[in-house]
């Protein structure tokens, strides 16, 4: 998925919204629950060394979708999508993952992970 596709999907999720809370940064979008304001995700650019650390291909935009994720699911996802779903960038690695945007993680899978992250933050 692209950043724009993620934001459009969140726009259509009941009870979800996104915003740009970082002054002067209109790229990084925080995905929130409308009822509590809790974060369930963030679209952010990561530095090249983040991808290299995990032996992942460095994408052109260097964009990742960080999502809340149950710890027991993370290992499965990181193995299934090696180099495409990574330990979280800039977030708690026990409770968050990063999906490399514009990678070959199927759109349906990313959408399911967005919905799961939303539910996990109830």
Image: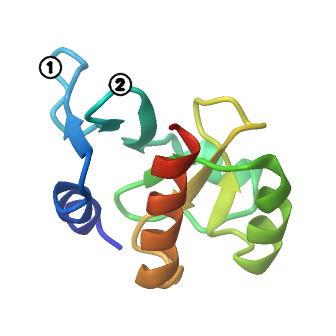
Query: Looking at the image, which residue is at 19% across and 29% down?
Result: 20
Q: Nearer the viewer, mark 1 or mark 2?
A: 2
**Residue tagged 2:** 36
Q: Is 116 situated above or below 20? A: below
The disc at residue 24 is 1
Question: Quick one: label 1 or label 2, which is nearer the N terminus?
Answer: 1
Q: Secondary structure under badge 2? A: loop
Q: Nearer the viewer, residue 70 or 48?
A: 70
Q: Secondary structure under badge 1? A: loop
* Location of residue 120 by image quarter: top right
Q: Nearer the viewer, residue 29 or 56?
A: 29
Q: Is residue 44 left or right of residue 92?
A: left
Query: Looking at the image, which residue is at 70% across and 38% down?
Result: 95
Mark 1 is surrounded, within 10 Å at the Cα level, by few (under 14), some (14 to 19) or many (20 or more) other residues, namely few
Residue 41 x, y percent position in the rendering:
44, 43
Q: Is residue 64 left or right of residue 120?
A: left
Query: Looking at the image, which residue is at 45% across and 49% down?
Result: 118
Mark 2 is surrounded, within 10 Å at the Cα level, by few (under 14), some (14 to 19) or many (20 or more) other residues, namely few
The disc at residue 111 is none
Residue 111 x, y percent position in the rendering:
42, 71
Q: How many numbered marks does the figure carry?
A: 2
C-alpha gap between disc 1 and disc 2 = 25 Å
Kindly give the residue lying farthest to the top in the view shown. Answer: 23
Residue 38 x, y percent position in the rendering:
41, 27
Query: Looking at the image, which residue is at 25% across and 19% down?
Result: 22
Q: Is residue 16 left or right of residue 71?
A: left
Q: Is 74 situated above or below 87? A: below
């Amino acid at each position: 998925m692209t950043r724009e596709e993620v934001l459009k999907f969140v726009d259509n999720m009941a009870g979800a919204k996104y915003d740009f809370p970082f002054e002067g940064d209109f790229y990084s979008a925080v995905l929130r629950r409308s009822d509590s304001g809790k974060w369930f995700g963030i679209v952010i650019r990561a530095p090249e060394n983040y991808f290299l650390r995990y032996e992942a291909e460095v994408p052109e935009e260097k964009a990742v979708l960080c999502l809340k994720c149950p710890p027991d699911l993370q290992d499965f996802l990181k193995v299934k999508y090696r180099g495409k779903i990574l330990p979280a960038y800039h977030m708690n690695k026990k409770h968050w993952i990063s999906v490399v945007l514009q990678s070959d993680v199927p759109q349906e899978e990313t959408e399911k992970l967005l919905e799961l992250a939303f539910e996990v933050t109830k």
